Image (spheres, helix red, strand yellow):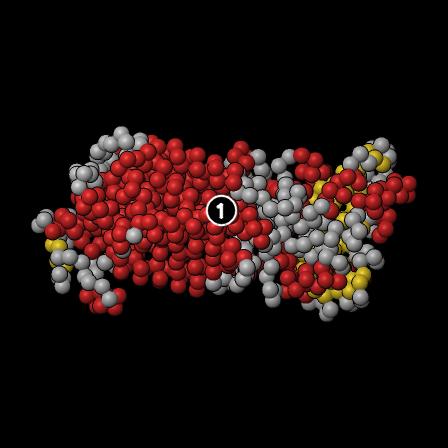
Amino acid sequence: MTRWVLGHRLLVGLVWLLLAAAGVATVGGTIDRLSQGSELPGRPGQQANDLIVERFGGTGGRNAPLLVELTVPAGRRADAPDVQGQFDAVVRRATPPGGRHASFAGTGDRALISADGRTTVALIYPPGHDGPNAYGPALSRVRAAVAGAEVAGAPVRVTGKPLLTGRDSGGARSPVAETLLGAAGAIVVLGLTFASGLALVPLLIAGVAIPTTFLLVGGLTRVTDVSFIVQFLVALIGLGIAIDYALLVVTRWREERAGGDERDPAERVEAIVRAATTAGRAVLLSGATVALSLAALVVLPVPFLRSVGYAGLLMPLVSVAVALTLLPVLLHAWGARLDVPRRSPRPDSRLWTRIARATTRRPLVAALVSGALLLALAAPALTMRVGQPQVAALGRGGEPATVLAALTDAGFGAGLAQPIEVATTGDPAALVRTLAAEPGVAGVLAPDAWTSGGLRIVDVWTTADPADDAGRDAVAGVLAAARATPGAHAGGGPAQDRDFADAVYGSLPAVLAVIALLTFLVLARSLRSIWLPVKALVLNTVSVAAAYGAIVLIWQEGYGSELLFDTPATGAITVWVPMAVFAFLFGLSMDYEVFILARIREAHLDLAGRGIRDTTEESVVVGIGRTGRLVTSAALILFLAFVALSTVPVTDVRILATALAVGILVDATIVRGVLAPALVTLLRGANWWFPPVVARLLRVRPPVAARTEEVRVDTLA
């Protein structure tokens, strides 16, 4: 294939140029068509929310209310008629046309007055749509109406989940700034790696792969909904993947041409071909494993995650295609000219060679120490709570966060910011009594005005945040009681969040088993081994577990979220994040495993072919020595891309970026640098065990003849 590509350089170059140009020209329209929603068709929470939105002019449902707050000075009461009259006037003025609201003046419900009588709160549901910018311009109206308003000498203030997220400005947000930040970090690493103009080549590959992926995503948006989060994943994770693949091939090409004669055209071609048939093969295998792991998202019954999976599949496939076709053309045309000043670096890293020798001398000690460290990192994952982050964690200072804290301190309940909305055709008073009796319920509200076509809305909120264990139990009790009542439909954000978790994790074991089996078959066929793929799957699982442990500590428990992101503990990990972390990190960490194992196998076959009996330890030293620097550079580039992703002002995306950054760093150092070579050394001859029956089933040849101390490999070669 590489020879064909080099024989049609102009055609290949023009095709990729046209695809990249089309991607750049259409990226704005693609981003505009991205979906802001996260629907769950057929689920009871989604059905209830759809009913509420349809009957009540697009208000409520999954969208959380805005909360208007007033705390009067000491000696005054917020439920006094004059105070409530003025406060209710502000609330009515702030409610957009078509919206609905509830205040003490309109309902007489004591749930809207604090126990000490000094604080009152009103709920406003503007007309909106599903997504992070649900209320759009309506928020400006609410804020303008409240701004400067005073009642009884105290300011009227507004808060709510839509304001706390910081995504209330409306409109699509481009990932350009984050991409430039990630590219800046990558160019520094590439510059240190190559110390020549070759540092530009991987960036150029990414500059073609990313717009082409956006072009394909644009096609997807015309046939299905694609989440707005995809733009950040394609731009930043796509940046890291494309650069990593190009880095692998360029590094091997540089090694292959080190002793060649650049004046000989045939030698120039052969150096590229040798790089493609070794490093290029590893890139192809890596792309396949990444795509397989992301297939876990595609098969889930959640449209939002399916769209992330589709985009995730496109990223490695496009990056592999560019690295295996356009990159040889660029190396043939400009590689030698860019590699200035030309130097002949050692093919192996002194540091990583020393680490590998130390590991192979004491493999059991290295395995036990690194394994214990990884298990310690992964241990907090056992306490992971899956759900929406605490509402308080969404705020980053400012008045909305201050007002929410004041409402919680006044005793209204932390669940007020995201109540459960129950639509009923039955007796609302009986339903109110039933729901108010549930443990953990802080308030129940059923305004007469919230009636449409025989349907009445009852709002219920919990004392604890729905992200807490106590809040989750309370939500479960409310949902069970509401759904057991004839004619009642329980919706709201907490209800749909529980449905989301059930949809994502209900069939998870079967999905993961299929992904593991397919990955094993691909690796077994490529590495001609049984135990190397098994080891790779186990180590990848450990890397993912360590990433889970990190986000539990940093985000759920708050050990670092304040320092790193100026955000308090979330109390829970967003429902979709663990699944996305598994899909991306499982595939990306497999990249490094494939790079290393492919080089170890290559060294093993080379040494065995020269008649060396015990090849395992020396193969590990050669493989780690020659890939250690490469894997470190590639991991650092991906790490910086994830750091750039963590600057996106969306808490969910930041949690995802934190998990990926920690996971890739742990994987490239502790796992691939110490634990993997230690296990390969301990397995010794078993690494290369590949029974003929398996070879026949997978339709591959057994390995080239090799003799070791542990096993004689009979071959067909």
Q: Is residue 333 left or right of residue 25?
A: left
Q: Is residue 282 visible?
A: no
Quadrant containing the C terminus is bottom left
Task: Give the residue at the far front of this rendering.
Answer: 10
Quadrant containing the N terminus is bottom left
Task: Give the residue at the far left of this rendering.
Answer: 611
Task: Give the residue at the far top of this rendering.
Answer: 341
Q: Secondary structure at mark 1?
A: helix
Q: What residue appears at the point 70 percent right and 44 percent down from the top-left corner?
A: 160
Q: What residue appears at the point 47 percent right and 50 percent down from the top-left corner?
A: 22
Q: Position of residue 426 (x, y in %)?
A: 78, 67
Q: Nearer the viewer, residue 167 or 330?
A: 330
Q: What residue appears at the point 83 percent right and 45 percent down from the top-left corner?
A: 93
Q: What residue appears at the point 40 percent right and 37 percent down from the top-left corner?
A: 186
Q: Position of residue 566 (x, y in %)?
A: 57, 35
Amino acid type, label 1: Val
Q: Which residue carries the number 1 mark?
A: 24
Within 10 Å of disc 1 (Cα), the crowding (few <14, some 14-19, many 20+) is some
Q: Nearer the viewer, residue 12 or 527?
A: 12
Q: Position of residue 362 (x, y in %)?
A: 22, 41
Q: Is residue 259 left or right of residue 42?
A: left
Q: Is residue 300 left or right of residue 628?
A: right
Q: Is residue 96 visible?
A: yes
